[in-house]
Amino acid sequence: MTADLPDAGGPLARLNAQLARMRSTQPFWADLPEAPLDSLAGLARLPVLRKSDLAAMQAKDPPFGGLTGGPVGGLRRLFVSPGPIFDPEGRGPDWWGSAAALSAAGVRPGDVILNTFSYHLTPAAFIFEAGAEALGCPVIPAGPGNTADQLVAIRQYRPRVYVGVPDFLKIILDKADEGGVDRACLEIGMVTGAALPDSLRAELSARGVAVSQCYGTADLGIVAHEDGGPGMVLNGGAIVEIVRPGTGDPVPDGEVGEIVVTRLDADYPLLRFATGDMSAILPAATGGRRIKGWMGRADQAAKVKGMFVRPEQIAAIGKAVPGCRRLRLEITRAGEQDRMHLLVEHPDSDAAAPLALKLAEITRLKGSVDVVAPGSLPNDGRVIADLR
């Protein structure tokens, strides 16, 4: 992640400059203490901002809940992520911080990149577009799906690098092999947004694609990435804490907790932003400050094919179709692809069709639906069961 804040004195000086700017320009942060922090550990005294709070904040004070560092007209792009949550993109080279992840994966200037993230409303494609531009790499703005067109682009442009979710890389390789398309040009896969099981990584490697993954969010950009060492190394623009879920209390290094990130950026500064994702800080001896990688969710939200599915979305499905009682979304994997199966307590089995339509409409993902007898689902409070 980039910023136009002074770097003299290192991260602590940049953090204190950021806090002073936030206090003076953003009403939301007006109550920040005026005294500078004497160490990064002092962050723990400041409040946590939860991703789950953004939707309500943005509805009350559109478009960004009063969190941007300047007028909307000074931003570069304006996004709408599922929730809905509204995310800005500021101006400046590699604003999202993806160049380091691409470079660590082996991407070099002039490499052609097949970018299969969506170029519609959500920022993932633009996160990697910016890093590619910073490295001097041309990009095929492929987006997801349309496998036949992807193969045409591969045949014509010979991309060396794939960017997208890991499942779709396997689909592209499968379709190329089935159709006799030479895809040997694809040597590097930069993947994120979905789980990368060891079995899938091994299969992709055996088929000639060296896969690296990174961790980031639509709010923060890229936070950490693989570089050949253990876990993931943290990006320089991110101050990362691991806290006990549901609190702002840091846990000792090595203990699993929720990832909390402070983003040092003048356009969209975020202070102690709780992502809802779980990880652990690896011992300092591993070289650089590192996290173990993505280790699940602190809440019940889950990523399916690179998109978050949240409990409030499942609740909205139940409200949209009269007669629903308990709902439970089960997420599994089959053939190295994510699958969604919605179980709904409802007295009418014919409700399955409208429920499937609402599932696709609200989550932007397709899944199967089964109507079950009222009272048959567990009374355990689980709305989303990630069974992968």
Image: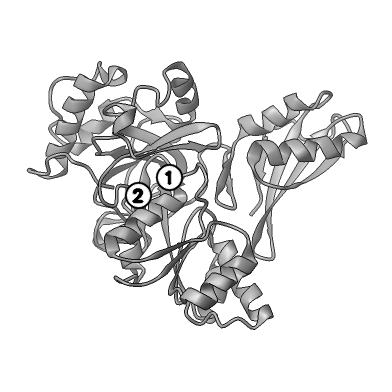
Residue 116: percent from the left, percent from the top? 52, 59
Q: Does 28 sit left or right of 200 as displayed? A: left
Residue 136: percent from the left, percent from the top? 29, 65
Residue 336: percent from the left, percent from the top? 64, 64
Q: Where is mark 2, residue-wise?
A: 223
Residue 142: percent from the left, percent from the top? 52, 60
Q: Residues within 10 Å of mark 2 (few under 14, many from 20)?
A: many
Q: Where is mark 1, residue-wise?
A: 217
Q: Residues within 10 Å of mark 1 (few under 14, many from 20)?
A: some
Task: Decide if residue 176 is in sight here.
Answer: yes
Is residue 365 or residue 238 the one in the foreground? 365
The amino acid at mark 2 is Val
| Residue ID at (29%, 37%) | 262
* SS at mark 1 in the image: strand
The furthest residue to the left: 8
Image quadrant of residue 74? top left
Q: Does 161 sit left or right of 131 as displayed? A: right
Label pair 2/1, CB-CB below 8 angstroms: yes
Above or below, 238 relative to 185: above
Image quadrant of residue 111? bottom left
Coloration of the structure image: one colour
